[in-house]
Structure formats: C-alpha cells, structure tokens
Amino acid sequence: MIFGALISLESFGAIATGWITRTLVEPKFTFSFIGFEWLQPLPGPWMYVYYAVMGVFGIFVMIGYKYRLSILSFTILWAGVYFMQKSSYNNHYYFLMILSAAMIAMPAHKFASVDAKLNPEIKSISMPNWCRLYFFLQLFILYTYASIAKMYPDWINLTVPELLMQSKQHYYVVGDLLQYKAVHYFIAYGGILFDGLIIPLLLWKPTRKIAFFASVFFHLFNSIIFQVGIFPYLSLSFAVFFFEPKYIINLFLKKKPLYDANKTITPNYASVIKTVFIVYFLVQIALPLRHHFIKDDVLWTEEGHRMSWRMMLRTKNSATTFTVVDKATSKSTIINFDDYLSKKQRKPVSAKPDVMWQFAQHLKKEYAKKGIDIEVYVRAFVSVNGKPRKQLIDPKVDLANAKWNPFKHQEWILPSKQDENN
C-alpha cells in the first residue's frame, strides 16, 4: 500500500514540479545510457501522459488492483525513463527500478486488496520468508556501500559536507545554521555511522525503536535539505519488515488475523528461489566494487560510479569547450552549448567523460546530416571538491571517432594526478 502510494506520488510529482519539462521536454535530445541511444522521450506532451499512466499504475498497486500487471507495467515504464536520460541521475532512481522489479515477484496483493476481494482463492495472511530476507539484504548492501564510500579524505576532512551546505545557504531558517562546522561534522561522521549501523540496529530488538527514530530524523533531514523525492519516505516504510508482525498488524491492519504457524513450509520451487537469490545478490555485491578494477580515481573518471550507492560524494565545477573541425576544409568552430543543450544538460556535458563522448557522437551525427564529416576536440578543466582545476580530456583526441569501451578505462581521460606545471 505504502509503496504504491509513493510511486504514484513520484510520478504525479514529476509533472507538478516541472521535472518532466526540464529533463524530458525542453531538451532537443537526452543523454541516455550508452547503448540506449534509441531510447528518447516521446514528442510533444506525451511524456506527461507517460508519467500520468505511471501514476495510475501506482494507484493500482496501492489498492492491489491487477497487481502483477500494474507493478510490471510501472517497472517497465520506470526503467525506460531511467535508461533514457542521465541529466538527473541519482542512485535512488536505480534503487526504485530494482525494487519495483523485485516487487513483481512479491505476493503483495494476497490480503486487503481489490484482487483478493474479487478472487478470494488467492487470499493469504502470510508471506514466504524470502520476501523479508530480500529487503534485509538489499538494504544492508545499499547502506553498507554508502557508508564505505564516504570513508575517503574529502568526506572525512569535511570538504564535501561543507561544499554541499554552502549551496544551501539561501534556505530560509536553516540556511545559516547549516554553515556551522559542528553541522558539517554531524553530517560527515553521522552519515558514515548511520549508513553503516542502521540495518544491524533495526534487526536487533533492543535497539530497534531507537534506530527507527534515528531513521526518521535522518531521512526527514535529507528530504528537507536535499529534496531527494520519495526515497526518504520509501526507506522509512521498510520498517514494517523489521518490527514484529503483531506490532505492525495492531498499527495498520487491526482486522487481520495473526499468522502464528510454527511449521516450516518448503515450496517445490525453493531451489529456483535460492539460485535466483544467489545470482542476484552476487551481482549486487559486485557492481559497487567494479571501479576498483578500473584505472584511476572514480571521483575523477566517473567510471564505475553508477549503480554503486555512491551518494552525494563529490562536487564538480568546470570550464569546457568543444571544437568541431571540418575534415574537408580544416575549418574549426567552437560549439555554443545553447544551440544544442538545455540548461540542465550543460553541467554533465562539462564535467563527465561519458556524457562528453556522447555529445561528441551527437555532434558528429548532426553534422553528418549536413554532409559534413567532422572531428571533435574537447578542452575540459575540471575541479573536484574545490581543488584546482585540471585537464580532464586529452585535447589531441578526436572524441567523435574515439571508441567507448564499457568494461575498461578510456585512455583519452587524462590522469587525476597531473604535474602542476603542465
């Protein structure tokens, strides 16, 4: 019920706040995940309809009407938006995608739903234990990696929290308060401790209520300060799996009988579930580790950053120019970003190597329509976490004709450690 309500709010909220306009309607094209270039927003007002349909599916999930079809449809549509654009990327979108996919397999419609009302034969007051185990493991992986990722110098010495809070100085009432060093210490070390300990503390009964109230404070703080959509409230909703069933029933479903069977039921498909579980969680454990096997610092190259629970770990500013060279005439032209990009797209194009490469490919296609074969050269000076700017891209490499290797370091990305005299 809570999940359906939240995904519906996420969908309709994207329409109401103008997020769809800024991210999917105003741009002439979107930077999709590499390999998904064919996946572009629907023209005209159709992306508003797209999100409205997602919102309706969210309501259907909430009331349990044609649950399997509704959550499957929402998952496909949400995955479409996730892979369609990277201008508004964050780990919460990824989390919602994999969580929605997992919810397809959950028997969430077996009680207090329209489906159970229309078809009493499916009604059940219990769930398989793997359902609860899935949430425990997924949340443990998410929070543990988020905690470990914060254990690096720029976070521990307060550089990143301070920079993040500087951008919030204009906030009413709390803006000035967020600039105090004590607040930065609280954010830095409180974030590491909360992410690292919250799941074990929720699992242990003596600390469960304290951990829950700490979660309320932590997630409301994130919601107010960082405006991260439904994620804080979604995270709080998982508490229903940590508290005793009797306690949750007394709070929310007073008419529901308590399932108290002592015997263990092993379904015929148990081996299939175990295999899927093992493979899925091995992938979840491996994905956040992949940047360790890629050359250079992930904060600089961005390679291995996505789908790794690396949340709010760095700030970047940059000065970037794209120069197009006509191969036939050798005439060079400096690209005006306003001719191609929305305001929201300029930041990733100026600071992220994969988006720079994609923009070079886009320019190549646009010029090819005019019958012009081009080369694209990039001069990008990027600062990570307030440090002096350094050149990110080899200015001698033609990005329009460079290849992208999804499994290896791109050698045209200059090293993060450079000679200060160069």
Image (cartoon, helix red, strand yellow):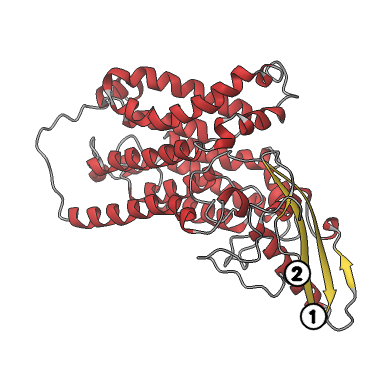
Give percent across and percent down for residue 109.
Answer: 34, 42
171 with respect to 336 (left or right) = left
Residue 217 or residue 182, whichever sits in front: 182
Residue furthest to the left: 263
Give percent across and percent down for residue 218.
Answer: 50, 24
Q: Is residue 303 above or below residue 314?
A: below
Q: Is residue 214 above or below residue 306?
A: above
66 with respect to 326 (left or right) = left
Q: Residue at position x 50%, y 48% from top? A: 94
Q: Residue at position x 33%, y 53% from top? A: 282
Q: Secondary structure at mark 1?
A: loop
The three-letter amino acid code for the residue at tag 1 is Asp
Q: Is residue 373 above or below residue 334?
A: below
Q: Residues within 10 Å of mark 2 (few under 14, many from 20)?
A: few
Q: How many marks?
A: 2
The disc at residue 373 is 1
Q: Is residue 42 above or below residue 22?
A: below
Q: Residue at position x 83%, y 70% from top? A: 324
Question: Which of the two discs, 1 and 2, labels the residue nearer the N terminus?
Answer: 1
Q: Quadrant of the C terminus?
A: bottom right
Q: Residue at position x 13%, y 44% from top? A: 265
The three-letter amino acid code for the residue at tag 2 is Lys
Res 254 visible:
no
Mark 1 vs mark 2, CA separation in Å: 18 Å
Residue 304 or residue 79, whichever sits in front: 304
Give percent across and percent down for residue 31.
Answer: 66, 59
Q: Residues within 10 Å of mark 1 (few under 14, many from 20)?
A: some
Q: Quadrant of the N terminus?
A: top left
The disc at residue 396 is 2
